[in-house]
Image: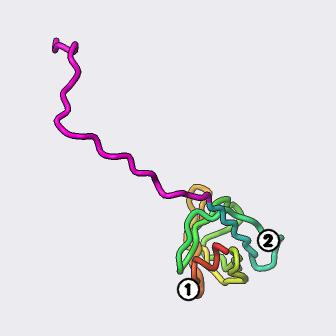
Amino acid sequence: MPDRSTAPSHDHEPAPIVPRAQRGSVLLIATIEHDGKQEPTRHRVRDLSTGGVRIDNALVLRVGDTVTVSIGAVHALAATVRWIRDGLAGLAFAAAIDPEQARK
């Protein structure tokens, strides 16, 4: 059994502690209109890019559905449901967006 009575030696100086940049919580909500067949539904945005969005709580959507999406300052954007998995859905926008506008 090795002798653990002595502390290990450290031949290098510890790295200086650098403060992290301040971070803020971001919460985006997407409103989805589904062919006017029902009331619009609200979904938390998980990922957002110029070409699409990943949302949660996608229980009423089906792959291939055409929907209208509003996120922040981006309103009435046509999108198609591309995939659904584990309650999440990936929607592809019909036209590219500026994600910064959606964050406003």
Q: In the rendered structure, does residue 88 fall within the stretch colored magenta?
A: no
Instruction: State the CA–CA distance, disc 2 to disc 1.
Output: 22 Å
Name the amino acid type tagged 2.
Pro
Image coords of residue 37 (percent x, y): 81, 75
Image coords of residue 95 (percent x, y): 58, 88
Please report the residue visible at 40 percent of the width from the left and 51 percent of the height from the top. 18
Quarter of the figure with residue 80: bottom right
Name the amino acid type tagged 1.
Ala
Q: Residues within 10 Å of mark 1 (few under 14, many from 20)?
A: few
Q: In the rendered structure, does residue 13 fall within the stretch colored magenta?
A: yes
Q: How is the image coloured?
A: rainbow
Above or below 42: residue 104: below
Which is nearer the eye, 89 or 11? 11
Q: Which mark is residue 40?
A: 2
Which is nearer the eye, 76 or 58? 76
**Which secondary structure, mark 2?**
loop
Residues rendered magenta in the picture: 1-25
Q: The N terminus lies in which quarter of the figure?
A: top left
Please report the residue visible at 58 percent of the width from the left and 55 percent of the height from the top. 86
Image coords of residue 43 (percent x, y): 70, 64
Please report the residue visible at 74 percent of the width from the left and 75 percent of the height from the top. 34
Mark with earlier residue (2, 1): 2
Q: Give the dominant element type of the magenta stretch: helix, strand or loop.
A: loop
Frontmost of labels 2 and 1 is: 1
In the picture of the structure, the residue carrying the numbered disc 1 is 96
Quarter of the figure with residue 94: bottom right
